Image: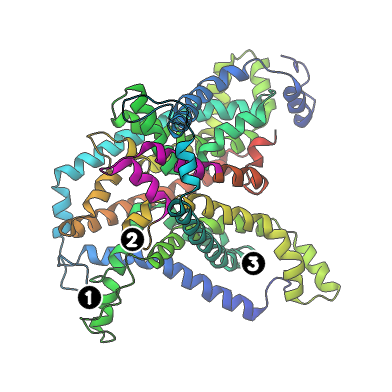
């Protein structure tokens, strides 16, 4: 061992020395996980790319490299329109989720409540239960003959013949359920960024004559923006390609881009070439977003060494 | 003066917090109520107390089969994810190598891939490779998506441990394996357990990916999804939902508390 006989050396410098030495066992440790991801993650995506360029095809026959499916996609108002619709829905959901989560995170981090970690766990716990079952709950609540409508009829607000019919199977239902599903999760990064805020900065601002509102706007809000950005992306990235929630509560008006991808592979009329193009386009958008905003995604503690 | 919040501001935010908690738990509470409701339809007014739906799902062979399949898939994939994640975390936390940024980007990239894209990718991959869809194909996919979570749990814990301990063990003649078994593993055990639980629950609950690569033995979420199309099955699905949600809440909350207690005890 390189550090043998240096027991008195402080831990920091010992580990520092350890880390500066090139270690030959790194490839041995990384071999299995990296091979696994190459085989079952990168290669499958490469096969999707091969389908999108017609190098592979679902139907036998002659095929070779062609951009036909890509060209058709980029000229198709249907697919691109659906993509923009999904982007818009997802942006609204992300913004609403952040707007709901921010005050709650602020309360937990800065109000001085003693039980903030217990309350945080209360907030996050629903996120850790089954996704599908939380969507199911809303299906039960929003249906024409569901909990909400039957309740309104029961208390006499609506008549049985005129339920509020736009509740389930609508764009609204999809956005409501997605908001419900993601709020607890997003409170976390915002809480972390507010929690690490140095309160002395706020005291200094107030000493210098700032009101609470000014101190919030000029000090707290800018310093918590990384958490807000992270939260926004944590919602936007998975929801823009969402297909499970819209297929359960969306009906036709809540149909999203992800549903189109799924349907191109699973209906009676599969079109794997077009589906591959749609999938790769979504993947490219998400990859660009992730790369552009990687510094907000708080994975530094893993990559910083 | 409190610089962050006025007394009124605090009151308003406390009420807001309360309302949000109601919003989050009301749907779960409604499921709980209607799981005991003696009616085919989940509608008001309530029509009396029954345990019929619980009894019905306990005797439902398809449902039990799906739960068993999911348990097997979750066990396989969580063990796989923790093993692979442990190796990767050890390399990321302890070793120095040139393409570390690229390797960690690859290891964490399954976090951001849309599941519909990954689902069809695996579908086309297994199709091209001639591998029939089965519980193994689901487990393979679940290992990929759970792997980043296990790494994100294990790396910070490894960082907390003083490397000098491992070096001292080596100085005293322990082999790398002995050092790991006697020094490192006991110290990271709480994190290993929580990584395992995260991977297990992720797999047990996963529908989107499984829907593309599942074989004839379907997993619990795939069963649930198909059951949702039949209104007659709704009441017992609600009963199952309540059981699964309550169990997972208990597991997750006690695991989190257990991890905190254990790590406090182990803190150096």
Q: Determine whether the residue tagged by mark 1 lies in a helix, strand or loop.
A: loop
Q: Which residue is mark 3?
A: A112
- Which numbered disc, 2 or 3, marks the residue closer to the eye? 2
Q: Chain of mark 1?
A: B
Q: Is residue A225 left or right of residue A203?
A: left
Q: Chain of mark 3?
A: A
Horizontal and vertical percent for residue B236? Answer: 19, 56
- Which numbered disc, 1 or 2, marks the residue closer to the eye? 2
- The answer to whether mark 3 and mark 1 are in CB contact below 8 A is no
Q: CA distance from mark 3 to mark 1?
A: 42 Å
Residue A271 among magenta residues: yes
Q: Which residue corresponds to the image point at 61% horizontal and 32% vertical from the top-left?
A: B104
The reply to whether label 3 and label 1 mark residues of one chain is no
Horizontal and vertical percent for residue B180? Answer: 56, 22
Q: Which residue is mark 1?
A: B44
Q: Is residue B205 visible?
A: no
Residue B138 among magenta residues: no
Mark identifier at residue A33: none
Q: Chain of mark 2?
A: A
> The magenta stretch spans which residues?
A256-284
Horizontal and vertical percent for residue A81? Answer: 47, 56
Q: Is the N terminus of chain B in the top left, top right, bottom left or bottom right quadrant?
A: bottom right
């Amino acid at each position: 061992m390189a550090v043998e006989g240096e027991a008195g050396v402080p831990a920091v410098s010992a580990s520092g020395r350890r880390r500066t030495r090139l270690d030959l066992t790194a490839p041995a440790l990384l071999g299995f996980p990296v091979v696994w991801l190459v085989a079952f993650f990168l290669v499958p995506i490469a096969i999707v790319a091969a389908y999108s360029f017609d190098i592979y095809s679902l139907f036998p026959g002659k095929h070779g490299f062609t951009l036909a499916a890509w060209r058709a996609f980029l000229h198709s108002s249907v697919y691109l329109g659906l993509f923009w619709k999904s982007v818009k829905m997802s942006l609204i959901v992300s913004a609403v989720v952040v707007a709901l989560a921010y005050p709650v995170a602020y309360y937990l981090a800065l109000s001085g409540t003693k039980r903030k970690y217990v309350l945080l766990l209360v907030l996050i716990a629903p996120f850790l239960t089954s996704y599908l079952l939380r969507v199911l709950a809303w299906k039960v609540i929003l249906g024409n003959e569901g909990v909400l409508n039957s309740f309104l009829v029961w208390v006499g607000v609506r008549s049985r013949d005129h339920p509020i019919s736009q509740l389930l199977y609508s764009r609204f239902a999809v956005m409501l359920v997605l908001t419900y599903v993601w709020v607890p999760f997003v409170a976390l990064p915002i809480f972390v960024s507010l929690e690490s805020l140095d309160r002395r900065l706020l005291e200094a601002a107030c000493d210098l004559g700032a009101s609470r509102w000014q101190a919030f706007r000029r000090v707290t809000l800018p310093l918590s923006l990384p958490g807000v950005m992270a939260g926004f992306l944590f919602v936007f990235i998975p929801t823009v390609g969402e297909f499970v929630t819209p297929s359960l509560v969306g009906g036709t008006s809540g149909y999203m881009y992800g549903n189109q991808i799924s349907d191109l592979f699973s209906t009676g009329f599969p079109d794997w070439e077009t589906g591959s193009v749609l999938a790769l386009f979504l993947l490219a958008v998400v990859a660009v977003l992730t790369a552009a905003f990687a510094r907000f995604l708080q994975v530094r503690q893993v990559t910083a060494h | 003066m409190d610089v962050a919040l006025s007394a009124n501001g605090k009151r308003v935010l406390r009420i807001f917090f309360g309302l949000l908690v109601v919003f989050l738990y009301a749907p779960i509470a409604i499921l709980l109520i209607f799981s005991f409701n003696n009616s085919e339809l989940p509608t008001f007014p309530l029509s009396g107390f029954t345990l019929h739906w619980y009894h019905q799902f306990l005797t439902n062979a398809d449902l039990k089969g799906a739960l068993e399949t999911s348990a097997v898939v979750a066990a396989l994939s969580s063990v796989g994810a923790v093993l692979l994640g442990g190796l990767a975390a050890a390399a990321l936390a302890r070793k120095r190598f040139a393409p570390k940024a690229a390797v960690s980007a690859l290891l964490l990239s399954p976090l951001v891939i849309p599941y519909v894209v990954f689902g069809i990718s695996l579908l086309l991959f297994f199709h091209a490779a001639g591998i029939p869809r089965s519980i193994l194909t689901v487990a393979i996919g679940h290992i990929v998506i759970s792997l980043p979570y296990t790494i994100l749990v294990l790396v910070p814990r490894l960082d907390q441990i003083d490397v000098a301990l491992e070096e001292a063990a080596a100085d005293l003649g322990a082999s790398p394996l002995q050092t790991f078994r006697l020094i490192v593993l006991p110290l990271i055990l709480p994190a290993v357990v929580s990584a395992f639980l995260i991977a297990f629950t992720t797999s047990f609950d996963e529908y989107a990916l499984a829907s593309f690569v599942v074989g004839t033995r379907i997993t619990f979420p795939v069963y649930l999804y198909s059951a949702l199309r039949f209104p007659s099955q709704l009441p017992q699905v609600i009963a199952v939902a309540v059981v699964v949600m309550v169990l997972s809440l208990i597991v997750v909350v006690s695991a989190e508390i257990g991890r905190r207690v254990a790590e406090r005890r182990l803190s150096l």
